[in-house]
Image: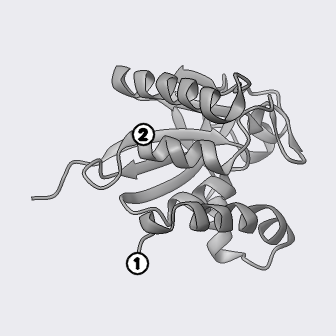
């Protein structure tokens, strides 16, 4: 009997980076790029990029908790992006690039807060600025954003921004890669 899938919604800069990593993680059945945490219903990429909607670029993951625990998703999350820079990841700046965890239930909220505490103590010395908020609504991004890295590995942004994050993930979490 198949395990019931759960959802996780995470923002760590450009959604192309997170999607490219998580679609390679054992237990993640689906990774969808989208928008979350803003005030506008059904925002477009152009609207979100304006920085005026309050949305973050996120990925929504459908995962099998019998294969990868929610905390395992968070361990990858805090390893592949910089959770110490408000509204920024590398050269990408704006509220849409903020570090954010949009929890789906009280258990995810507890685990997210514990992960922040653990990573602050171990790696970041209290500097994590990751927003932890309840998920209100998720809006999938336009079709051309889905599987972007897979479809465009030679694009400049993919080579210089996405690929290094994927390489770091593959090195750090080699034992958790899909076959």
Position above or below: 106 against 20: above
Give the position of the C terminus as an image quadrant. bottom left
Give the position of the N terminus as an image quadrant. bottom left
- Secondary structure at numbered mark 1: loop
Tell me, what colour scheme is on the image?
one colour
x, y percent for residue 37: 62, 27
- Neighbour tally class for label 2: few under 14, some 14-19, many 20 plus, Cα within 10 Å: some
The residue located at (72%, 75%) in the rendering is 152
| Residue 109 lies in quadrant | top left
| Residue 128 lies in quadrant | top right
The residue located at (56%, 23%) in the rendering is 117
Q: Which residue is mark 2?
A: 71
x, y percent for residue 174: 50, 68
Position above or below: 105 against 123: above
Q: Is residue 116 left or right of residue 6?
A: right
- Secondary structure at numbered mark 2: helix
Q: Which residue is mark 1?
A: 179
Which residue is more in the foreground, 47 or 116?
A: 116
The residue located at (86%, 47%) in the rendering is 90
Separation of residues labelled 2 and 1 (CA atoms): 21 Å
x, y percent for residue 103: 46, 28
Position above or below: 65 against 173: above
Would residue 90 be seen by someone viewing this image from the given angle?
A: yes
């Amino acid at each position: 009997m198949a395990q019931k899938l759960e959802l996780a919604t995470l923002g760590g800069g450009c959604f192309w980076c997170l999607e490219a990593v998580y679609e390679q993680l054992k237990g993640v059945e689906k990774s969808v790029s989208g928008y979350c945490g803003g005030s506008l219903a059904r925002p477009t990429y152009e609207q979100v990029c304006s920085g005026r909607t309050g949305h973050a670029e996120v990925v929504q993951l459908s995962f099998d908790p019998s294969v990868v625990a929610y905390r395992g998703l968070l361990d990858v999350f805090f390893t592949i992006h910089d959770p110490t820079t408000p509204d920024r990841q590398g050269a990408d700046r704006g509220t849409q690039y903020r570090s954010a965890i949009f929890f789906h239930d009280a258990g995810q909220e507890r685990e997210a807060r514990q992960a922040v505490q653990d990573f602050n103590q171990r790696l970041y010395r209290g500097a994590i600025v990751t927003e932890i908020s309840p998920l209100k609504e998720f809006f999938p991004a336009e079709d051309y954003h889905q599987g972007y890295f897979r479809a465009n590995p030679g694009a400049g942004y993919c080579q210089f921004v996405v690929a290094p994050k994927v390489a770091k993930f593959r090195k750090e979490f080699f034992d958790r890669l899909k076959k």
